[in-house]
Amino acid sequence: MVDVIRTLDLTKVYPGGVTAVDGLNLTVAEGEIFGLLGPNGAGKTTTASMLTTRVIPTSGRAFVSDIDVVKHPAIAKQLIGVVPQTNTLDRALTVWENLYFHGRFFGMGAAASRAAADEMLVKFHLTERAKAPVMALSGGLAQRLMVARAILHNPAILFLDEPTAGLDPQSRIGLWEIVGGLHNSGQTVVLTTHNMEEADQLCDRIGIMDHGKILALGTPDELKNSIGADTIVTVNADGDLAELATRLQETVEGVDSATTLDGSVQLAVRGTDRVLLRVIAAADAAGFAVRDVQVAPPTLETVFIQLTGKELRD
């Protein structure tokens, strides 16, 4: 497969010595949805901003479709579509005009831009809103319009930065369906998110990121399988949880790791046979009163916790 994004030791250090992205080496293949997953401040948005020419790297290089984004930013901008975190629609224009003038801005002729705007209205179910001011749109409709605008000029790569932040569940699912449809048509998408369900649902590959570095990289299933556990058991109990974690890891067969997190102990367990009974019995034998026990399969958040010892939604 052809790589349409490449970074070589890409680094961004902000004034004051804050390293947002630290020596990032990454490739994204044509036609895939690639996700950067991590907590706020992990470096996801800065990475996307450097790839889309909005932030100049401190060092290293970045290429989109073999175009150096620092040396040739104008050419690179023609190859990308961007949906940022904030609403950047022109509030002085209607829905249709936002689409039409975007095409004109990217060098499309008047007829071609009109046709493309009309096509996007149909494709994104916005025809009835064509003449409406964008101020009248709900958050979900505004986000849908921003995606339509971003792909109107047929970019090679679409960047979505926290695309569903602040959306209600129905709008979020609707946007997921749109992104899935773009993927089916062959669109390359780079998605930054701290929503693990979103990453799991949409992405072909995911880079889990924190403190400017990629901690783990692979498909969602590869990442979840990488911890070697069949089950994640979360135990809520009274007392010294660090001591409880140690005792459970020592006495419950199949426990690979035990982590204390926000008033609970999280166990990564191989095998599921009578796991609840064994965990409760071990805690009781150690003198701990268990208030609640939950069992779930490994998730992307589990992977992040195993790597960093903290929750993904920090």
Image (cartoon, rainbow, N blue to C red):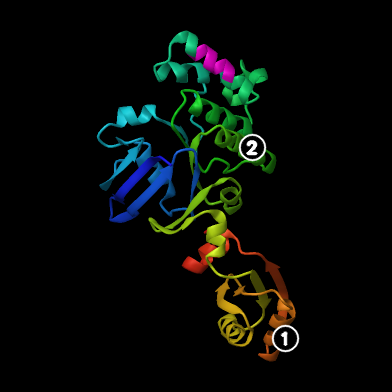
Residue 305 coordinates in the image, percent (x, y): 53, 66
- Mark before the other along the chain sequence, 2 or 1: 2
What's the residue at 54%, 40% (across, down)?
163
User: How far is the residue under mark 2 from the one under mark 1?
Assistant: 45 Å
Tell me if mark 2 has few (under 14), some (14-19) or many (20+) residues whose alpha carbon lies within 10 angstroms of its own: few
On the rendered image, what quadrant is the N terminus found in?
top left
Residue 66 coordinates in the image, percent (x, y): 32, 36
Residue 147 coordinates in the image, percent (x, y): 54, 31
Answer whether residue 114 is magenta in the image: yes
Q: Which amino acid does label 1 sit on?
A: Ala
Q: What residue type is labelled 2?
A: Glu
- Above or below, 211 relative to 233: above
What's the residue at 63%, 69% (across, down)?
230
Asked if disc 2 and disc 1 are in contact, CB closer than 8 Å, the reply is: no
What's the residue at 57%, 53% (across, down)?
196
Q: SS for tag 1?
A: helix
Q: What stretch is highlighted in magenta?
A: 113-119
Q: Name the residue under label 2.
A: 177
Q: Nearer the viewer, residue 63 or 271?
A: 271
Q: Report which quarter residue 52 is drawn in.
A: top left
Answer whether residue 216 is magenta in the image: no
* Left/right of residue 259 with respect to residue 284 in the rendered view: left
Q: Residue farthest to the front?
A: 1
In terms of secondary structure, what is the magenta stretch mainly?
Answer: helix
Q: Residue farthest to the top?
A: 111
* Left/right of residue 184 with respect to residue 189 in the rendered view: right
Q: SS for tag 2?
A: helix
Q: Residue 281 carries which label?
A: 1
- Above or below, 238 relative to 54: below
Residue 58 visible to the viewer: no
What's the residue at 39%, 29% (across, down)?
79
- Above or below, 145 relative to 220: above
